Each structure stands twice: as structure tokens, then as C-alpha cells.
Image (tube, helix red, strand yellow):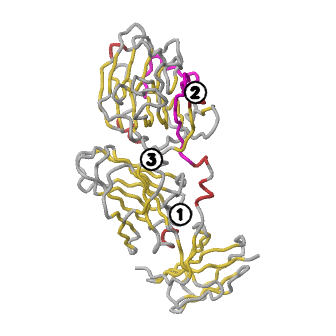
């Protein structure tokens, strides 16, 4: 157990300025039909012809009518045909009556093939859907990484699905289907080839790295304004937001981060799912209940879109997410923050916060903290899609003029250059200097005293000097002057 002498409490600021950088957010497109205009994305130059291919995206459809438009009369998610007639050449992925999705596939000179997903409805929360088309085999439908349905299309091999209409995202090929889509959409991708189940799961809850093979169209939806949508695959199939009055760029809460881990199994006893990094620690979903089909855990390398509900948010630029494939399955979380310097410095007061799915505000998550192991374990169980982030970043230090405690002493303070740190017991200690936002600017081991710190190279301002040795863990505010 670490001991910290508390004389003054310092609030470490501040994530709020960072959150103003819209480019850090995971954004989404809100398709919201107005009047007779359908909002959709026209895809430049895409041809699927006789190729094997895969289409995938995250979607959260409206559960009720929006502006008088019912979303369950087969609104198109992706397609290149006149959807008034499913028998004409082309392909359509659409929301089916009841809220699931369906695929209509009609190659030239072929009968139509229709397959309705038996997976969950696409309302209430974000769901990931993927459709793989293997011309000498099957159309396969996935929801949240689970194969739900398939149908044989081998008899249509070699026949084109290109039509007189272009491929559009969020509408059919005409761009004027009578029953427009009303939904949030994110991370739209078209791949060359029929993706395997593992490939779908691998990138389900994370962005696709630049240069990934066989990616034909990739819209991460990281825009905040405008009608031009960049194709991040590098293939040149940029999109144009059409009828933008029926579309809104918005902050996304789709479960997508910068890295992810996953497990799909029917036997969860002793199974955990973890994701982490050298600078932010290891986050783990554990004690996963029976009946869950799969679990995705991901890390996002930028601050949350807001910090409402978090006391003293600090400068945490990483948060984590847990996405159970089936809502209602129980799990717990564990956060090992051993490699997170700021969390160690502010360990006594730090709190793990959580927010459920698409809700805006964070709340204190009840945890058991083990300061010897540098871990927090949730004491209750969770059962839905959640975000997690550390907060309540505070530190304690003695008066900046006194600059001493029972164990350590710092002088001179303020200083323009060299600081001498002394120890009452003379034992070895780790010495670290942080900026007020938690960035490490110096680290070293003091085995001989006094220990000399030269900070003449640092900009003028306040810093936190932390001394940790054996069971001692004390921090001081130091003032660097010109």
C-alpha cells in the first residue's frame, strides 16, 4: 500500500481543451429524411461486376417513424438497382419489415435471390452487419460477427450485377426510393473477396489500417462538415453526400476504436478478453457469463467526446469499450494501470468511470482497488455495451515554499535550473517529473543523495515532482521560472 501525505489538493487540468478538436472524434453520419429528399452517399466509380465481395458497416436504425417516414418498408442501406422492383439487375441490402436486414441479389439474366437475416433487429443499439458474396458459393449474412444465414448462388457465377444505376450508400441506385433510410451509420467498407468470419471479427470494433489489402471502399465517417467523403482505402471511390439537408454529421458512439481484441466461444469459464498499450495499461473483460456468444474489447486513442459526470477528468487521452455480441450477458472489468504513469501518481483518488452505450454522461463505476497490484476490479456486473475511462485525477503536494516533508526535501523552489532533492532515510527512490496534464518529462532512480535534477531545458511553469521508494509515494509542486 502506498502512503501519500496530503496537505494541498491540486486539480490537474484538463481534457476539455483537447475535446474541442473534432478531428479526434469518431464521427458518424445521421441520415434523417426531410420531405421528398433522401440523404445518401453517391459512391464514385464503384464496379462489382462479377467479383466476390463483402459489404460491412455499423448501423443504428430508428425504432419509430422519423418525420412520417416508416423505416421498415425495405429502405435501402446499399445498392445499385431501382428497388421498386427486386427482379431487376443489381444488389440491395435493406432493412426488412420488423427491423432486421435482407439482401436481394439479381445478376443479369438470373432469377432474384432474397435472404432475410435471422439476427437481431437493427434498432435500440449499434449493430455491425456484414454481407459476403462468393459467386461460386454462398451469400452469407453476419450480425456482430455471428454468421446467421446463407444461400447458395453458385448458379449465377460469371454473371454481372452492374446495372444502369450507380452504387449508393443509404439509398438505392436511383437515389430517390420512396421509403428512405432513417438511421445512424458508421465505418462503411466494401472489400474485394468474401471475407472470412475471423476477418470480419478482426476489424469489427476497430478502424482499418492504411494500406490493408483488398479494401475497395472505406468511409470511416471522420468528417464534421461538407459533402465530400474521402475514400480512405486509397482506391479513389470518394463519396458525395447528396441532399445534405437530410444528413447530419454527428459524434458517433459506435463501438469502434484504434485496436481491439475478441473472443467468440460457447464456454466462458476462465476466459478473458484484454486490450491495452504500453502507456495506458491493460483493460480486461472477465467473469463473462454463460450464454454470451462473443465479446469485443477495444481501445480508443483519443479523449471521449465529453466528460460530463467525471470529477477532475485530467488529461486521459485513452478510453476503453466493451461490446457484448448479445446484450444482457453478464461480465466484469479489470483495469491494470501499472504502465500508466499519471494513474500511479494520482492513484489514491483515481476512479474508473463508465457510460452505457450511447448515453452522454459518465458515472462512477464501483470498483475494488488494489494499490499493491495497480488494479481496479468492478465489484458489480455489467450487461450491456459500455465505455470506461479513468478520472478524478488529483495529486497531493506540500506548500511550494516549504518544499519538504518528513521524508523528502526539494530546494530551491521556485528554480530556474537545478533542483537538489534530499531524503531523510537515504533509501533508493524513483524520481519522476510530470507536466500538470500528466506527461512524463523526466524519470530517474535516486540511489545517492542529494539527487540533482536539471530542469533548465523545461518551459517555465508548474510541474509535479513525484518521489517513490519502498512504501513512500510523495509528490511536490515545483515552479520552473525563466
For numbered disc 2, what is the local secondary structure?
A: loop
Res. 158 visible in picture: no
Residue visible at 50% across and 37% down in the picture:
212
> Mark 1 to mark 2: distance in Å?
40 Å
Where the N terminus falls, by quadrant?
Answer: bottom left
Q: What stretch is highlighted in magenta?
A: 25-54
Q: Earlier in the sequence, mark 3 or mark 1?
A: 1
Secondary structure at badge 1 equals loop
Q: Is residue 29 depicted above or below 284 in this figure?
A: above
Q: Residue 313 carries which label?
A: 1
Disc 3 vs disc 1: Cβ atoms closer than 8 Å? no
Tell whether position 444 is magenta: no
Q: Which mark is residue 237?
A: 2
**Of the two numbered discs 2 and 3 in the rendering, the one whose residue sits closer to the viewer:** 3
State the mark number for residue 358. 3
**Mark 2 or mark 3: whose residue is earlier in sequence:** 2
Q: Where is residue 69 in the image (x, y as percent from the top left)?
A: 46, 26
Look at the image and tell me in which quarter the C terminus lies: bottom right
Q: Where on the picture, by quarter, is residue 399?
A: bottom right
Amino acid at each position: 500500500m502506498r502512503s501519500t501525505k496530503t496537505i494541498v489538493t491540486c486539480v490537474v487540468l484538463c481534457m476539455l481543451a483537447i475535446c474541442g478538436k473534432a478531428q479526434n472524434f469518431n464521427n458518424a453520419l445521421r441520415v434523417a429524411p426531410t420531405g421528398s429528399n433522401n440523404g445518401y452517399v453517391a459512391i464514385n466509380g464503384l464496379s462489382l461486376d462479377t467479383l466476390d465481395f463483402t459489404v460491412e458497416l455499423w448501423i443504428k436504425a430508428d425504432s419509430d417513424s422519423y418525420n412520417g417516414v416508416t423505416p421498415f418498408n425495405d429502405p435501402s442501406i446499399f445498392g445499385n438497382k431501382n428497388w421498386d422492383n427486386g427482379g431487376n439487375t443489381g444488389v440491395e441490402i435493406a432493412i426488412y419489415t420488423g427491423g432486421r436486414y435482407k439482401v436481394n441479389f439479381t445478376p443479369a439474366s438470373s432469377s432474384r435471390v432474397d435472404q432475410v437475416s435471422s439476427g437481431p433487429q437493427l434498432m435500440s443499439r449499434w449493430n455491425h452487419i456484414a454481407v459476403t458474396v462468393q459467386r461460386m458459393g454462398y451469400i452469407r449474412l453476419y450480425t456482430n460477427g455471428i454468421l446467421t444465414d446463407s444461400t447458395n448462388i453458385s448458379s449465377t457465377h460469371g454473371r454481372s450485377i452492374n446495372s444502369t444505376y450507380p452504387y449508393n450508400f443509404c439509398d438505392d441506385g436511383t437515389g430517390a426510393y420512396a421509403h428512405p433510410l432513417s438511421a445512424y451509420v458508421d465505418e462503411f467498407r466494401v472489400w474485394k473477396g468474401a471475407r472470412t468470419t475471423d476477418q470480419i471479427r478482426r476489424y469489427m470494433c476497430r478502424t482499418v489500417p492504411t494500406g490493408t489489402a483488398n479494401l475497395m471502399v472505406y468511409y470511416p465517417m471522420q468528417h464534421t462538415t461538407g459533402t465530400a467523403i474521402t475514400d480512405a482505402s486509397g482506391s479513389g471511390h470518394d463519396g458525395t453526400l447528396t441532399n445534405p439537408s437530410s444528413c447530419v454529421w454527428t459524434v458517433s458512439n459506435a463501438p469502434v476504436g484504434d485496436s481491439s481484441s475478441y473472443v467468440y466461444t460457447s464456454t466462458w469459464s476462465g476466459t478473458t478478453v484484454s486490450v491495452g498499450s504500453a502507456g495506458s495499461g491493460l483493460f480486461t473483460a472477465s467473469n463473462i457469463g454463460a450464454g454470451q456468444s462473443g465479446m469485443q474489447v477495444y481501445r480508443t486513442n483519443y479523449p471521449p467526446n465529453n466528460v460530463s459526470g467525471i470529477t477532475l477528468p485530467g488529461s486521459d487521452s485513452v478510453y476503453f469499450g466493451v461490446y457484448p455480441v448479445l446484450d444482457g450477458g453478464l461480465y466484469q472489468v479489470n483495469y491494470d494501470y501499472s504502465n500508466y504513469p499519471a494513474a500511479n501518481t494520482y492513484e489514491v483518488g483515481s476512479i474508473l468511470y463508465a457510460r452505457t452505450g450511447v448515453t452522454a454522461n459518465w458515472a462512477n463505476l464501483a470498483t475494488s482497488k488494489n494499490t499493491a497490484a495497480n488494479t481496479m476490479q468492478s465489484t458489480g456486473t455489467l450487461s450491456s455495451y459500455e465505455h470506461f475511462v479513468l478520472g478524478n485525477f488529483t495529486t497531493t503536494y506540500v506548500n511550494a515554499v516549504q518544499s519538504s516533508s518528513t521524508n523528502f526535501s526539494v530546494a530551491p523552489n521556485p528554480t530556474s535550473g537545478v533542483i537538489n532533492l534530499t531524503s531523510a532515510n537515504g533509501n533508493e527512490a524513483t524520481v519522476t517529473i510530470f507536466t500538470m496534464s500528466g506527461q512524463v518529462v523526466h524519470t530517474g532512480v535516486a540511489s545517492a543523495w542529494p539527487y540533482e535534477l536539471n530542469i533548465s531545458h523545461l518551459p517555465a511553469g508548474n510541474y509535479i515532482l513525484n518521489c517513490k521508494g519502498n512504501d513512500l509515494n510523495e509528490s511536490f509542486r515545483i515552479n520552473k521560472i525563466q
